Image (cartoon, helix red, strand yellow):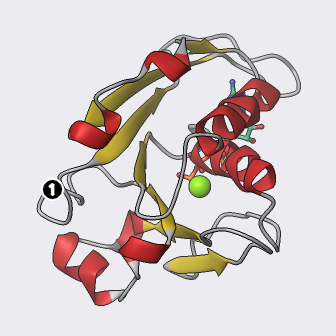
């Protein structure tokens, strides 16, 4: 799908949030500045998490509690080299909603079920003066939990 603006990216995060429950794992892939944190911000706002969702680059994982419902754990795996290190973070996957930026390849073996979003900045894309430029987002469901992606359309 084409996501034209940062607001639309946040709205996609909000749509995704409506599907999420404890135990869910979402991997966001895409180069620097692709829009992973922008999507997670919309997701976090829709979940009503406490604390602003910002780029967690200098902490590997940040937990955002909610008044009700599973907390959002926002992981930046940029400096995590492999799934063993993700495991070392001691995240309680069962009771949390986990969103991992730079999750590509990290989640194999950790779980059978996860949702993967690949965000791509089109080569030669035209950026407006305020830096807005369409992104292409591909959503892939892994495992039984995400076999049905009809909520996306
Ligand atoms: N269509 C779009 N969707 C999302 N973000 C966009 C779009 N067009 C422009 N942007 C801008 O691109 C930037 C995306 O930054 P963001 O921090 O979300 O990326 P990121 O993938 O998390 O990067 P990093 O790898 O550094 O964590 C923001 O400044 C945002 O305003
Ligand atoms: Mg980011």
Q: How many marks?
A: 1
Residue displayed at 66% across by 32% down: 15
Above or below for 112 versus 136: below
Q: Is residue 10 left or right of residue 57?
A: right
Q: Which residue is mark 1?
A: 108
Query: Which quadrant of the structure image shows residue 66?
Result: bottom right
The picture places residue 37, in percent across and down from the top left corner, at 64, 51
Q: Mark 1 Cα within 10 Å, few/some/many (few <14, many 20+)?
A: few
Above or below for 131 versus 38: above
Of residues 57 and 137, the one drawn nearer to the viewer in this rendering: 137
**Secondary structure of the residue carrying numbered label 1:** loop
Residue displayed at 38% across by 73% down: 94
Query: Which quadrant of the structure image shows residue 144?
Result: top left
Quadrant of the frame with the C terminus:
top right
Q: Is residue 147 left or right of residue 134?
A: left
Above or below for 130 versus 97: above
Please identify the residue farthest to the front as the structure is shown.
Answer: 68
Of residues 50 and 54, the one drawn nearer to the viewer in this rendering: 50
Q: Is mark 1 within 8 Å of ligand 1?
A: no
Q: Is residue 111 left or right of residue 122?
A: left
Q: Is residue 60 left or right of residue 18?
A: left
Please identify the residue farthest to the left as the structure is shown.
Answer: 109
Above or below for 38 versus 71: above
Residue displayed at 59% across by 37% down: 16
Q: Quadrant of ligand 1?
A: top right
Residue displayed at 11% across by 62% down: 109
The picture places residue 114, in percent across and down from the top left corner, at 31, 48
């Amino acid at each position: 799908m084409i996501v034209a603006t940062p607001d639309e990216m946040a709205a996609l995060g909000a749509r995704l949030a409506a599907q999420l429950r404890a135990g869910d794992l979402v991997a966001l892939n895409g180069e620097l500045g692709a829009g992973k944190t922008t999507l997670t911000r919309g997701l976090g706002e829709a979940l009503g998490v406490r604390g602003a969702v910002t780029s967690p680059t200098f902490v590997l994982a940040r937990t955002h509690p909610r008044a009700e419902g599973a907390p959002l754990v926002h992981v930046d795996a940029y400096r995590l080299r492999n799934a063993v290190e993700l495991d070392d973070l001691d995240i309680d996957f069962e009771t949390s909603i986990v969103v991992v930026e730079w999750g590509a390849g990290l989640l194999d073996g950790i779980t059978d079920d996860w949702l993967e979003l690949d965000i791509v900045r089109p080569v030669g894309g035209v950026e407006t003066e305020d830096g807005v430029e369409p992104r292409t987002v591909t959503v892939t469901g892994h495992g039984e939990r995400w076999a049905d992606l009809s909520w996306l359309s």
